[in-house]
Image: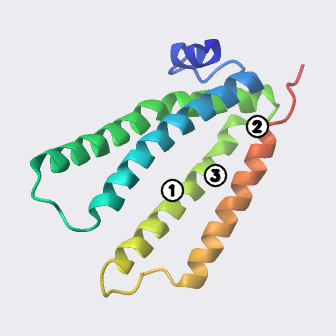
Amino acid sequence: MNEIKTCLKKYFSFGGKASLKEFWKWCFSVLGVSLLMACVLAVMIAVFGNRTPSCLFYEVAFKVLLILFACFHLAVLCPSLAVASRRLRDAGVCPWSMLLPLAMCIASAFVFMDAGLAGMSAMQPSVPVVWQVVIYAVTALVGFVFICLFCKPSKK
């Protein structure tokens, strides 16, 4: 719990170093909250499907949960980048190198949204399926390499 408090105290602090324990506790706590909120949203979608019930409570609750989900991720973005930067510095890696996986994740998100929106309509996705697979595979490979960099022992 102290590691999470440390990450929140160092909200905008990109300098210094972060231990493996601090980094991974932060990541798993953010992941846990995110998965909990996503599960609640998924259950609501599974129960009601594509049809919108005439219940005002459902509509309001769903919109509030979506807003909370987005606000939570915006709130933890800066401390997540800060702790990742400090962890990379502690492992002896240039923190600016995390821009590559960040850019790959953003590109993958746009490709994923394009494919999802095309699946909801009669349109074809603007990115061919072969390129979608390549983008996802490269993103996964870059992400795996960076997870290995985060796990490097501290430089003394």
Q: Which residue is mark 1?
A: 106
Q: Quadrant of the N terminus?
A: top right
Image quadrant where residue 141 sits: bottom right
| Residue plotted at (68% across, 68% down) | 137
**Residue 91 image offset from top left, x and y in percent:** 81, 30
Percent from the top left, x then y, of residue 34?
Answer: 48, 40
How far across and how far down the image is residue 118, in percent?
A: 37, 79
Numbered tag placed on residue 150 in the rendering: 2
Amino acid type at circle 2 is Phe
Q: Which residue is mark 3?
A: 101
Q: SS class of the residue under badge 3?
A: helix
Residue under the image location 43 percent in, 38 percent down: 73
On the image, which quarter does residue 21 sit in?
top right
Determine crowd level at label 1: few under 14, some 14-19, many 20+ residues with C-alpha closer than 10 A: few
Q: Residue 49, image x and y in percent?
A: 29, 65
Q: Is residue 143 above or below residue 138?
A: above
Residue shown at 47% from the left, 67% from the top: 112
Decide which of 153, 1 is in the foreground and name it.
1
**Residue at (66% x, 39% y) in the render:** 96
Q: Amino acid at mark 3?
A: Pro
The CA span between labels 3 and 1 is 9 Å
Task: Count residues near mark 3 (Cα–Cα under 10 Å), then give few for <14, some for 14-19, many for 20+.
Answer: some
Q: Amino acid at mark 1?
A: Ile
| Left or right, residue 154 beside residue 27 | right
